[in-house]
Amino acid sequence: GRDSALLEGTNIKTLRTSRYRYVSRADGKETLYDIQIDPNEYHDVANEPEYDGVLSEMRHKMLKHLIEMERPKRRTWAY
């Protein structure tokens, strides 16, 4: 299975993993929540230096999801 899920709404995209929730808005604003530590998502950690690597990884995962949606994989038929 997948390790993350992409959700889309009007002017917003959200990527959810088992530990983090990353939100990207059309106006360029980003938020990142560490839902293991903050399950109610009260504290945005996107601007905290210790989360720079996580933020970069979540951006990459989101881009990968979006590219995969644009270019779906070829069907393979089980014979």
Image: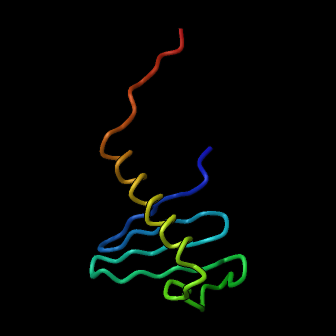
Identify the image's colour scheme: rainbow, by chain, secondary structure or one colour: rainbow
55 is higher (above) or lower (below) than 62: below
Point out the residue furthest to the bottom here.
42
What is the residue that sits farthest to the top in this orientation? 79
What is the x, y in percent for residue 57?
51, 64
Residue 42 quadrant: bottom right
Question: In which quadrant will I find the N terminus?
Answer: top right
Task: Estimate the x, y position of residue 77 in percent, counting from the top left.
Answer: 47, 16
Instruction: Look at the picture and state if 35 lies above or below 60.
Output: below
Q: Is residue 40 left or right of residue 31?
A: right
Q: Is residue 77 left or right of residue 37?
A: left
Q: Residue at 50% of width from left, 73% of height from top?
A: 55
Q: Residue 76, percent across and down?
A: 46, 20
In terms of depth relative to the viewer, which is nearer, 54 or 43?
A: 54
Q: Residue at x 60, y 71 (%)?
A: 20
Q: Is residue 15 above or below residue 26?
A: above
Question: Which residue lies at the image location 72% right of the left edge and 76% below the top edge?
Answer: 36
Residue 12: x and y in percent read 36, 73
Residue depicted at x 32% and y 40%: 71
